Amino acid sequence: MGNYTNMNKFVISFLLITAFLAVSCSDDEPKDVVNEIKMSVSAETGTYIPWGSDIPVECMLVMSEDNPGVWEPLGFNSIKWFTYERGHEYYLSVERTILANPPMDGSDRTYSLLRILEDRIVTEPEIPVDKEINSEEDIEYYDMCPFNKYAIEKEIIVNENGEISYSDGHNLPSYDNARIWLECILDKADPNWIQFNKIPYMAIYSFVLSPLTDEIRLVRNESSGPMFKEVIPESEFAHITQSMKPGEELRYALILANVYKKGLQKLEFTIKKQ
């Protein structure tokens, strides 16, 4: 009986020592460091060279509160739940995790968005058009332009009821809510890809060339393209719906312009009466 009791004491002591050593070893293992920090995100972008590559790619420029005055490159998708928009300047609250065991081919830290504390649109000061635009020849193009960055649907269908659709049958919203969408088709292999995504090469405005008037109008594109009603005013839309015969079409043109109201690219499309 005594030997049995002694054996139990030995086993219990052994287990206690093992557990203590396990806890001690666990405490000694490196752990991730998680903090909430404030981070500024520049309206300007930068470049960095990804691991395993020798080709620079565009990225955000960020500055954290614990490294003030230093702008550092960070990939566009590196802050979870945050979507960067060019031309915007942000002040963020983010959760930063410094990894104890980072991957061999990746960063030693991750970021997750907690709150957007400030979101401010930053563009170059808008400059009024210096001269009167009476013809297409009066529109001055910006440096390195025109270039092939944007595309739009080539044919828009309008019926007698004023319903708008694309030639493939896809319906657009009502006249008041429809938009002429600008699609960026710039090839990332283009040597000027990074340059052409900077603010001076963004399509902020459109000069509208209409077949129904000699007047050249300037409209704002907003974020995704000009509103349909801004490009084709009510008087011209009424002509299309009421006066044109089925199968007839009108050819319009947009000369996309930057914040300086200088041309970037010319795009043409037709309005066809169904």
Image (spheres, rainbow, N blue to C red):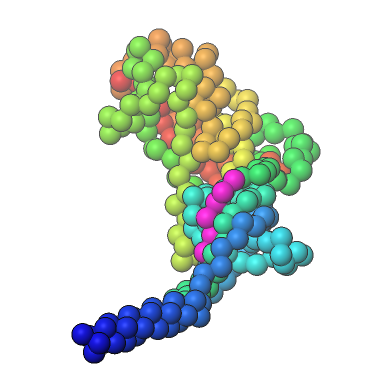
Residue reaching furthest to the bottom: 3
In magenta stretch: residue 113: yes
In magenta stretch: residue 17: no
- Point out residue 126 in the picture as x, y percentages from the top left corner: 74, 40
Residue at x 74% of width, y 33% of height: 132
Residue reaching furthest to the front: 1
Which quarter of the picture shows residue 158?
top left
Task: Tell me if residue 189 comes above or below residue 205 in the rendering.
Answer: below
Closest to the observer, 49 or 4 = 4
Which quarter of the picture shows residue 269?
top left
The stretch of residues the image draws in magenta is 110-115
Quarter the C terminus occupies: top left
**Residue 86 showing in the rendered view:** yes
- Point out residue 209 in the picture as x, y percentages from the top left corner: 56, 31
Closest to the observer, 78 or 268 = 78
**Residue 207 showing in the rendered view:** no
